[in-house]
Image (spheres, helix red, strand yellow):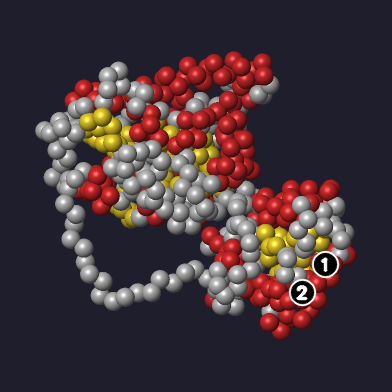
Amino acid sequence: MADKQLLLGDEAVALGALHAGLSGVYAYPGTPSTEITEYIQAHPLAAEGAVHSDWTCNEKTAMEGALGMSYAGKRALVCMKHVGMNVCMDAFMGSAMTGANGGLVVTACDDPSMHSSQNEQDSRFLGTFAMIPVFEPSDQQEAYDMTRAAFDYSESKGIPVLMRLTTRMAHSRAVVNPGDVRDQNQMHLPEHPRRWVTLPANARVRNRELIADNATFEEDACRSQFNWLSDGKDHSLGIVACGIAYNYLMENFPEGCPYPVLKVSQYPFPCRLANELASMSGKILVLEEGQPLIEKRMRGVFPTAVEIHGRLDGTVVRDGELTPDEVRKALGLEAHPAYPASQVVVPRPPALCQGCGHRDFYTALNNVLKKDYPTAQVFSDIGCYTLGYMAPLHAIDTCVEMGSSFTMAQGAAYSGVWPSVAVLGDSTFTHSGMTGLLDAVNAKANVVLCISDNLTTGMTGGQDSAGTGRIEAICEGLGVERAHIRTIVPLPKNYPDMEKVIREEIEYEGVSVIISRRECIQTLRRHAKK
């Protein structure tokens, strides 16, 4: 038994995976999930066991790499933020049909309140959609224990498991008591190879098996060590508390909750336990972080009318994070006293770093567009450079999702927008921008596609970028004419040359790629210290 450790929720998942005999972690960095992979990369056990831990190009390739490792009988972990699940959904849905050989755990870190995200989507829906079991820890110790259990469950049932964390769970610390370290699995191929070929004849058989298995998964959830129903003295209210919401509930009742409580951390939703709770109280409060998945589900669970309260009726705030204070308010308890601010702090919006190459590129782009091309539209993407939207630059017009800038610029160009300019970063280019570039080449689109290359994945802390040193070759290989692959160095002294290149490529009728390359100022400082 190892000594106690003070761990982030992300780190507890990572350590649980290593101690479960992990052979590989596959991930694309994204807050709040990044620390899982970084912890594994830095841990001695990963080096000793030669655990694969390189960053992937995107979440889809991560899911596919892990599925291949599971096929070979090894234990694999996939990590991403919630919107990354959208990218890997094809492989994720397919993995429900193939099942798992070696344990396969997919960790999705959701971001209620959108601290660093474009939406609040709830990954539990995706587990339900795929008919895959979902585990949702309530604290850091459970995150560690549950990760170990999830690998065991995945192997015993032959199914991937979705592990769902939220920002506060991922990025808060608590003491964890680690367990013993398990050896990695030996390679062994699937006993049922037919499953792994999803031709319709095979998939129809497997689909019936998966439907039948879900009844077993639900009964397992009813008996799970992570789900339980506890009685209380006051039966005027019953409470369903999911994941971290259970932690928040108990924080408000340090002497013990007076109401019956159903704690839910393993899904499918344990309907039998919910009916037992309803037999204790005809009024139920549902506490869940994210969207009202369970609240809606419960309305179809009970054989008789039960009064249900939660996010749908406003008892709990519908958007943003669930907090201990919000739980307190929903319970009708008196609010804790507020502490007056000692001083007025002016909010500071995020901004590009001083000395950032993105800043200099946008300045040169603005100099050209605002002077000579007032009808220009600039389609941007997800990354540090999205901050070009903020004052004083106001340099971009859109930002939707990873890789969208190149293809949106084409759609706008076909509709008559000129000049149509797109901006994305080097990591986003290899994540999901390359296919958009190929579309542009095939369609002979009249667009200027700009890759702001800071030689790293800057927004999430400076992880390796898959395209470093190869971007020009990739663009040429995808069919862009070599004469219209232009590389510039974004520095104030170079503004005249940068502006000249931008003007020339706007005036060229076809696909132009401008690569603006200078190392991220943050990674440059770290490299200088080394």
Determine the residue positioned at 79% across, 51% down.
Answer: 414
Determine the residue located farthest toward the left in the rendered image. 233
Picture layout, residue 454 above or below residue 198 = below
Query: What percent of the width, then of the height, locates residue 498?
Result: 76, 76
Rendered view: 300 above or below 519 = above
> In the image shown, does 311 or 132 lie closer to the viewer?
311
Q: Is residue 507 above or below residue 22?
A: below
> Which element carries disc 2, helix, strand or loop?
helix
Residue at the image position 68 percent from the left and 82 percent from the top: 492
Which secondary structure, mark 1? helix
Check residue 447 in the rendering and tell me which mark sits there, or answer none. none
- Residue linked to disc 2: 372
Residue lying at the far bottom of the rendered structure: 493
- Amino acid type at circle 1 is Glu
Q: Nearer the viewer, residue 119 or 486?
A: 119
Which residue is under mark 1? 505
- Residue drawn at x 16%, y 52% is 334
Quadrant in which the C terminus appears = bottom right
> Circle 2: is it few (<14), some (14-19), or many (20+) Cα within 10 Å?
few
> Marks 2 and 1, Cα distance to the nearest angstrom?
14 Å
In this picture, is 306 found above or below 336?
Answer: above
Q: Nearer the viewer, residue 465 or 5?
A: 465
Q: Is residue 5 left or right of residue 352?
A: left
Q: Which quadrant holds the N terminus?
A: top left
Q: How many marks?
A: 2
Q: Earlier in the sequence, mark 2 or mark 1?
A: 2
Q: Residue 302: percent from the left, percent from the top?
A: 30, 21
- The residue drawn where x is 41% and y is 41% is 291
Q: For mark 1, does the 10 Å Cα neighbourhood hold few (<14), some (14 to 19), or many (20 or more) residues?
A: many
